Structures are given as structure tokens and as C-alpha cells.
Amino acid sequence: MKTKIFIILMLISANSFASEKNFVGCWIGKIDILRQVLSIKICLDVDSSKKLTGKIDIPQQNAYGLKLSNISCSKDSIWFDLIANVMNVAKFSGRISNPGTEKAFISGSFWQMGMVGTFELEPFIEEQEDTLQSIPIHEEEVAIRNGEVQLAGTFTRLSEQKKYPLVIFISGSGKQDRDENIFGFKIFKMISDRLVRNGYATLRMDDRGTGGSTEIPGTSETIFDFASDIEAAIEFLKTRDDVDTTAIGLLGHSEGAIVAFVVASKRQDIGFVISMAGPTVRGDSLIVEQIRIQMLGQNAPDSLIQETLNQQREIYNIVRNNGDFERAQQILLQQAKKQLEFYPEEISSQISKTMIERNIQLQLESMRSDWFRTFIDTDPLIYIEKVQCPILFLFGELDTQVPAKLNAERINHLRKKPGIKIKIVPKANHLFQKARTGYTYEYPILPKKFAQGFFESIEMWMKSIMKQK
């Protein structure tokens, strides 16, 4: 079967360009065509005959390592083709700004099968993951029993035998492994490595039903089930002679932060909480805002955005009242048809009725679950206001999943409370990567590193609260 690749480009910029060397390397960015945005990664090199070669990744189309053809450059301009077949050639042409600097930037447009779109690229710099190989550590596999569930995890500290302040990691929604590995970005592993270097012990666990952790068949775990798992972990840690039980903290990412708030709101033995992009508004309001932001990014008209949000609120009423799910199915089908209008015919024609129906069934299954019912009705602020220990709230400036402005403003009144710190990390997305837009389509192509200011904010805050102990 021949795969159709829909791309079109032509570059525009404003600086001078001397030679191929300014283009050699990897670049990341996006293609924008008829309201559809695709993330891309392009890598260019020079072969033994001194000719430019290149490949392109398009993660949303599950396309990796596609060969680029007819690559040439002159001064500040570059041209290349992506040939899907003889009848389907995407032609790229463009220029570069600030060549040879960290602010280098390529922008432009492309042409393919009669369609014209734009694209943008910036240098991709992959840094080595910060590891613990250079310092002696103690790392062990642990198993923690919580009723019918057994949780598998990794306990890590420096090799010296003594009592360490400890951080328990709590992942976001969906089944995550102990590293919270998202598109190859091992979020919790990297944070754990940094904390251990700073003299903390850490506990990372696989979520129920993931890796070495078991689950109860036929159940839909909620925030409160995950909170129960964390409490079991706390009791386990209290039996160890290498843990300072007066300084056990929780680090929750996204929904995991809500779990941390729930646990800390009812226990006096939690030393501190770190909220990474933790929602502070109720789940239904959060999802409505996520939909609004995504539709704005697709240049949807205001009338369609408002109609979609009203339909979403109608779905919430159906879920809460265990009502007419046939009506919910009709709403989802109507939304799917309208969304297809935003895509080129060449793309929308490949989305079959079966694919749409399957996607709708998955959404309906989620809506009927205990997890969804609990999530849309849980107000994190109720638990946050009951927490007595210090809390660090970290938000990404460009986060489109837990928008910084909406969620930070809701807890502004807590700023004067001792131990409370609210920090918005500049240019960071939901994973706290340095981002250009913050939209989820960027996640797979961004460098596997944290934005500047992320680690620094955690370290400074933790030093300050530890001094007060």
C-alpha cells in the first residue's frame, strides 16, 4: 500500500546565508496547512561527495526517516523535495534567519498537489541525559502491597547509609510507567536523578496495570484509588531505616498533583508537595478550556467553538445523570463531521466511517467510567486549602493541557500562606520542555530536556523549606 504524505513548504526569512554548513544538523518545527498542524523534524548532513542529504520525521503520521530529495542551497536559501510517488511530490523552498546562532530560524511555505501551506523550523539540540553513573548510588526494586494490588517501583538514594528526605513521584492521567516515559522523555527518571544528586531519596512506581504493577480486573481506577496507593507507599517507606520519615514529600504531575493534594490534605506526615502542572480547577472546566484552546489553534470560528463547548457541557449533564448516552453519541458524531471540514479533502477522505465510529465508542467508554465521573466533579482547591505543609506550584507558560493563567489565578489567594510558591516556567509546555507553541503535537520532536528555570525552581524552593525544618 502506498502511503500518502501531505506536506507543502516554502521558506521565508531575512538574514544572509553563506553555505551548506548553516543548514547541516537537525531542525524541529511545524507544518501548517488548511488548519491542520503537523510537527516535523528534519535532519540535514553532507555526504562523502559533499552533497546535502536529509531525512524528515512526521510523528503524527507515524512517518520517520523519510528521505528528502533534490536538496540544494544558495546563500540564505534552501530547496528540497519529499517524494511520496511520481504523482505526489512535496516541494520545499526557503530561507534562514540568524544562521550559525542559537536564534537560527527557518520559515516558509511548501507546495504539494495544488495545496500551499507554511512551515517553521528551529535548531534541534539534543543534550545527554543527566545520569548518576559518575556517583555511587543505591538503587533497588521494591514491591508494595495495597489490598489486592501490588505496586512495583524503584527506590533510589546515594550509597552512604543514612536517613534521607524522600520524594514520591505520582504520574498524570493514563497508565504510566515509573519513569513517566512520554515519547522517549523520561520525566520522572530525570528529576529523580537530579534530586538524588542533591541528597534526596526517591520512589518511582509503575501505575496500576503497567510494568510490574497489578490491577483489579474490570475496575476503573479513580483519583482516590491512586491516593490509596500513595498512602500504602508512605506506610512502606516508614519501615525503612534509610528514610527520614519527617521529610517525606510528594511530587505529582498533572492529575498526579491532584492525587498529591488529596493525600496531603488528610495526613500530617507529609513534609511538602510539588505540583507539576497540577490542575486547580474542576475537571469539567479544565476539559472545556482544553477544547477551546485546541480549536483556537485550528483557527475555528468563534460560533463553532461556542457550539462545541455548549455540547461538551451537555455531555457532562448526561454523564452526571447517567442519562441519554445515545444523545452523547449523536453529539460526538456531529462534532467529528464538523472537524473533518477543517482538513484537506486528501486527508479527510482517508478517515473512514469505521475509524470515526471506533473513536466515538472509545470516548463513550471513557465517559461511562468511574474515572471520568470522578475527574469532572473533583475540585482540587477543596483539597489544596486543607494542606498544611509547604506547596510548590509549577506551571508551564505555554501549557495547553493545564493552562498556566487559568490555574495559577485560582490559587493567587494562597501566595501569602507560608511555604507556598507559585512559579510559571517561561516557554515551557505541559511536560516542562522548552516549546514554541505548547501544543501536544510538538511533544515527540522537542529535545528530551527541561526548560531553563524548571530544575532551578525546585532546587531553590526545596533548600528553603529544608532550612526551616
Image (tube, rainbow, N blue to C red):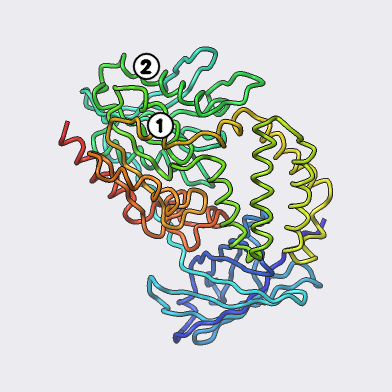
Instruction: Work out whether residue 268 or residue 87 is closer to the camera in this orientation and state it.
Output: 268
Looking at the image, residue 368 lies above or below residue 303: above
Q: Which residue is mark 1?
A: 383
Looking at the image, residue 303 lies above or below residue 370: below
Q: Which residue is mark 2?
A: 236
Q: Is residue 454 left or right of residue 2?
A: left
Tell me what residue is drawn at x 53 percent, y 24 percent: 212
Classify residue 315 by image quadrant.
top right
Q: Position of residue 158 (x, y in %)?
A: 26, 31
Label 1 to label 2: alpha-carbon separation: 24 Å
Q: Which mark is residue 149?
A: none
Mark 2 or mark 1, which is nearer the start of the sequence? 2
Tell me what residue is drawn at x 32 percent, y 50 percent: 423
Helix, strand, or loop for circle 1?
helix
Amino acid type of the residue that numbered disc 1 sits on in the rendered structure:
Tyr
> Dividing the image into 4 quarters, which one contains the N terminus?
bottom right
Q: Residues within 10 Å of mark 1 (few under 14, many from 20)?
A: some
Q: Position of residue 311 (x, y in %)?
A: 69, 48
